Amino acid sequence: MIMNTKRFIARASVGVGLPAFGAAGLIALAPSAVADSVFPAAGDESASATINDLRATGYDVRVNFLDGTPNVPLYECQVNDINNPSAPNVPPSKTTVYVNILCPNDK
């Protein structure tokens, strides 16, 4: 009878410990997920800065000019959208992102 009690206590300890560890694990992973999201937001900076930031992170960047080929420097253009069709766990070195750009073509 004593052996059964020990097994019950061991099972209860493991059952209580796992949820606590699971919550701690999720909390511990949350900061790293936020730290890894260096993806610039569309419109926060010039198109050239956004492209440079993405390439520096390791992404393969494809540019879509929404109004045709611009006749102004890329730093005068703004990013309309950044599309990353890859799964979240794919490393940047194996990911192609598509950057949609709008430029003032009046010069």
Image: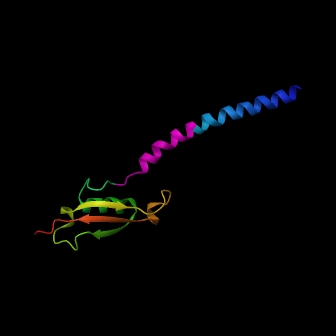
Task: Please state if 9 lies on the left or on the right of 66 as rendered.
Answer: right
Is residue 45 placed above or below 74 in the rendered structure?
above
| Residue 69 in picture, x, y percent from top left | 22, 74
Task: Please state if 35 lies on the left or on the right of 81 as rendered.
Answer: right
Task: Please state if 61 lies on the left or on the right of 89 as rendered.
Answer: left
Residue range highlighted in magenta: 23-39
Tell me what residue is drawn at x 30 percent, y 69 percent.
64
Q: Seen from this angle, which residue lies furthest left?
A: 107
Tell me what residue is drawn at x 61 percent, y 37 percent.
21
Is residue 61 placed above or below 37 in the rendered structure?
below
Asked if residue 49 lies in the magenta stretch, the reply is no
Asked if residue 27 lies in the magenta stretch, the reply is yes
* Colour scheme of the picture: rainbow
| Residue 23 in picture, x, y percent from top left | 57, 37
| Residue 93 in picture, x, y percent from top left | 44, 64
The quarter of the picture where the C terminus appears is: bottom left
Q: Seen from this angle, which residue lies furthest top?
A: 2
Tell me what residue is drawn at x 34 percent, y 60 percent.
82
Tell me what residue is drawn at x 42 percent, y 46 percent.
34
Count of marks placed on residues: 0
Is residue 103 placed above or below 24 in the rendered structure?
below
Give the dominant element type of the magenta stretch: helix, strand or loop: helix
Q: Nearer the viewer, residue 69 or 3?
A: 69
